[in-house]
Amino acid sequence: MVTGCFGGVVRDVLLNEIPLVFRKDIYASASLLGGLLYFLLSGWEMFAPLATSLAILAVVLLRLAVVRFGWKLPDLNRSNVS
């Protein structure tokens, strides 16, 4: 998760853009869920390459769905919250 997010930050900084991970996009969350999925699958003594492949596939599919459907995380810093 850390290396994936940091690589994206470096890419965006070099392109002079606001890093994707600092916006409301589901980016780090997808990596975290993939890591948790791998942890659960490997805990069930699943064949390690299969667990890795399934976790990677889950992250890729989630990111594709985010891009396709425009899903965003909720904004927790809304100034108009009473």
Image: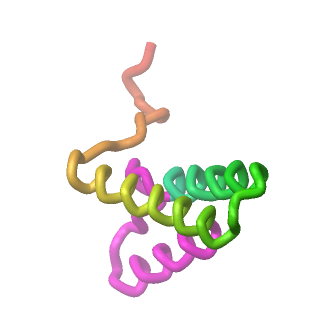
Q: On screen, 15 above or below 44?
A: below
Q: Residue at x 65, y 57 (%)?
A: 38
Q: Is residue 35 magenta?
A: no
The one nearer the camera, 72 or 54, is 54
Q: Residue at x 54, y 68 (%)?
A: 53
- Residue 56, horizontal then vertical, whole percent: 51, 65
What segment is highlighted magenta in the picture?
A: 1-27
Image quarter of residue 31? bottom right
Q: Is residue 4 magenta?
A: yes
Q: Residue at x 41, y 30 (%)?
A: 78
Q: Residue at x 45, y 62 (%)?
A: 57
Q: Is residue 33 left or right of residue 13?
A: right
The one nearer the camera, 24 or 56, is 56
Of the 4 image quadrants, the one containing the N terminus is bottom right
Image quarter of residue 23? bottom left
Residue farthest toward the left in the current orientation of the protein: 68
The one nearer the camera, 61 or 44, is 44
Q: Is residue 73 left or right of residue 44?
A: left
